[in-house]
Image: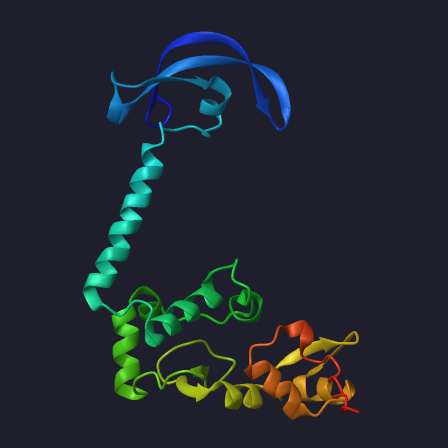
Amino acid sequence: MFGRLKVVWPLGWARYSTDKRLSRHALVVCTCKPREERVMFAVPLCRLRTSHNTSCGCIRLEQMERGRARRAAIKRHHGESKTPMWNTWMEMRRRCHQQGHKDYRYYGAKGITVWAPWRASYPVFRDWMLEHCGQHPGPGWEIDRIDPRQGYQPGNVRWLTRTDNARRHSNSRWVTFQGQQMTVSQAAVAAGLPPSTVITRIAKGWPRESWFTPARKRQRPG
């Protein structure tokens, strides 16, 4: 047995592409345990030995079905998917624990984490926030860590406007500008920009590479 696959008989040799090269491999006829005696198909023996093939595709389908059921259960449980509070919770977890997230290097890679009960349960996070910080105020507001050295945990979070958050972190957020490490405010001065201009750009969600680009001068008509 190779996972759920059972070899029935050898089929012979055939040309098979591996690592962008055509090579000669043994083919075998297999059945899959959940569908045994109903479906037979040929598989290169090398893919069985390396565990590239462990089923007829039913494992992947079952994983997808479990994922759909889990998302449906969450939606039925609280009915708040895609709300501002839900989006805050999802983004908080992603940037701290999902290495592929665009902001992971500024959070998870620096040791910023989400308190385990919050990470595991949206209702636990939501209930604490409603009791201690209130409902999500609306567009332009985001969750903020009171002590930037600590993670997202009870007693260290609050709602803050995006502009105030950018202004607060302008003196504590370090960036590399012209090959030197400095705060956002120092980098703004070095770039010949008012710190308030850079703070506004950060608050508006400008990409990091555009924070310190020179401001365009408006042409007067005439």
Q: Residue furthest left?
A: 77
Residue located 80% across and 92% down the image:
222
> In the figure, is residue 111 to the left or right of 5?
right
Asked if residue 145 is positioned above or below residue 47 in the image, the reply reads below
> Which quarter shows the N terminus?
top left
Residue 117, quarter of picture: bottom left
Number of numbered markers = 0
Q: Quadrant of residue 103?
A: bottom right
Quadrant location of residue 160? Answer: bottom left
Q: Position of residue 136 (x, y in %)?
A: 34, 83
Q: With 153 as the anchor, is 149 left or right in this view?
A: right
Left or right: residue 82 versus residue 95 is left
Q: Is residue 131 left or right of residue 182?
A: left
In the image, residue 139 sits, relative to residue 196, either above or below, namely: above
Determine the residue positioned at 47% across, 79% down: 150
Q: Nearer the viewer, residue 68 or 1?
A: 68
Q: Does residue 221 appear in this view?
A: yes
Percent position of residue 159, x then y: 40, 86
Display coloring: rainbow
Q: Position of residue 198 (x, y in %)?
A: 65, 86
Q: In this view of the protein, can residue 172 be seen by the observer? A: no
Residue at figure coordinates x 62%, y 19% from the top left = 22
Q: Position of residue 100 (x, y in %)?
A: 52, 58
Residue under the image location 41 percent in, 71 percent down: 114
